[in-house]
Image: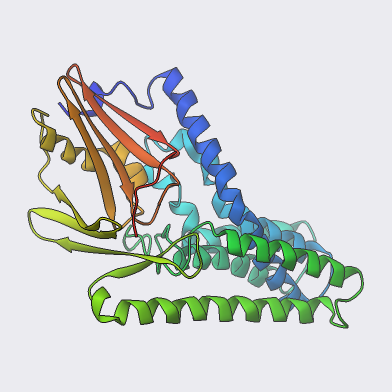
């Protein structure tokens, strides 16, 4: 049976809670590659809006630029309130605005007055969400109107290129705060860095559009890879009965059909495909538009490894059916599906 009660892995046992905490901690540490990008954007906003002052507005901008990614601290709520999970409620405009307003009111009551504070708080948090929207992870932009995830797949959710650029940018802003950088003050350096961000994303968006318009890629979505000039291609076709994802790989075009029917029992290898709809699998796969998988069925054991074209080698979810029980295991991947 595929009911939650038959899982060996769940959020109800103490050992599994430890495993889940470790998994989320690993993911948080990995995600800190984009810590510097969000930090730089918060720094830029504070300097452009309020000038080159090391004061409350700068501290507020830095705090709000990172707040959304502290969602892992809500882990105890995830079981009963799934939308508090990773890239959930904390990555919504309504959350950012509410927190910004609350902080502004509290600081006002404490006597810390800054006419730009609310704007800086909101923009710093909103730019974090917008950056994730441009990447591969996706954010629920229209919550609470709907819980759909929106994204543009212009760059990786965690981009080494942006991380290196952000480190250089933060160093430059700190130097400009102390003195100047090639005759530019901190606000001018912030404006220059903001312009570079706009050019970078605009260029990648134009390249993505050009690649998708090529005849051989018609109907496919171009997805970013670790190499800035290399893209992979995926397409999803959905009918009333199934979802089929097509991926261009080194071996040619591969298809991954996923039936929409929810089966109550697993009797043959193909039945394990219905684990895609299991709550613990969906907790990780709900962000992604192009799911794919590997099947490995032997006598007495059926296993499927869920991944996505967007996630690459970052993480996957295994569903293992053995001795009449289903186990769901989340892990960071050691091998990557060879997607072109």
Q: Position of residue 155 (x, y in %)?
A: 48, 66
* Residue at point 86%, 68% (across, down): 175
* Residue at point 60%, 67% (across, down): 122
Comparing 105 with 330, the one in front is: 330
Q: Position of residue 187 (x, y in %)?
A: 78, 79
Q: Quadrant of residue 99?
A: bottom right
Residue 180: tell me if it is visible: yes
Q: Is residue 17 above or below residue 48?
A: above
* Residue at point 48%, 36% (across, down): 75
Q: Position of residue 294 (x, y in %)?
A: 25, 41
Side of 255 where 107 appears, left or right: right
Residue 101: tell me if it is visible: no
Image quadrant holding the C terminus, namely bottom left
Q: Position of residue 295 (x, y in %)?
A: 22, 37
Side of 26 where 142 appears, left or right: left
Q: Is residue 266 above or below residue 92?
A: above
Q: Quadrant of residue 145?
A: bottom left
Number of numbered discs overlaid on the protein picture:
0
């Amino acid at each position: 049976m595929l009911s939650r009660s038959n899982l060996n892995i769940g959020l109800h046992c103490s050992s599994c809670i430890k495993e889940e905490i470790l998994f989320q901690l690993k993911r948080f540490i990995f995600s800190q590659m984009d810590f510097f990008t969000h930090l730089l954007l918060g720094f830029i906003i504070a300097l452009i809006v309020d000038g080159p002052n090391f004061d409350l507005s700068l501290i507020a901008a830095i705090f709000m630029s990172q707040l959304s990614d502290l969602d892992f601290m809500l882990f105890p709520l995830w079981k009963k309130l799934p939308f508090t999970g990773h890239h959930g409620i904390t990555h919504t405009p309504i959350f950012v605005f509410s927190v910004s307003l609350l902080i502004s009111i509290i600081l006002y009551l404490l006597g810390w007055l800054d006419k730009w504070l609310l704007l800086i708080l909101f923009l710093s948090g909103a730019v974090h969400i917008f950056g994730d929207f441009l990447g591969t992870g996706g954010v629920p932009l229209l919550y609470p109107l709907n819980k759909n995830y929106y994204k543009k797949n212009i760059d990786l959710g965690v981009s080494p290129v942006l991380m290196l650029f952000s480190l250089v940018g933060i160093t430059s802003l700190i130097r400009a705060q102390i003195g100047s950088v090639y005759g530019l003050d901190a606000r001018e350096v912030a404006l220059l860095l903001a312009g570079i961000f706009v050019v970078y994303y605009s260029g990648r968006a134009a390249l993505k559009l050009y690649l998708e318009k090529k005849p051989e890629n018609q109907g496919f979505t171009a997805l970013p890879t670790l190499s800035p000039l290399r893209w992979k291609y995926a397409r999803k076709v959905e009918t009333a009965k199934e979802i089929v994802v097509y991926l261009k790989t080194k071996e040619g075009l591969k298809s991954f059909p996923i039936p929409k029917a929810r089966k109550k029992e697993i009797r043959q290898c193909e039945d394990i495909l219905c684990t895609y709809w299991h709550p613990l699998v969906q907790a990780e796969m709900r962000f992604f538009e192009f799911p794919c998988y590997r099947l490995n069925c032997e006598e007495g054991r059926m296993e499927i490894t869920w991944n996505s074209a967007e996630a690459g080698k970052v993480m996957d979810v295994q569903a293992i059916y053995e001795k009449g029980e289903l186990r769901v295991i989340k892990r960071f991947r050691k091998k990557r599906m060879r997607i072109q």
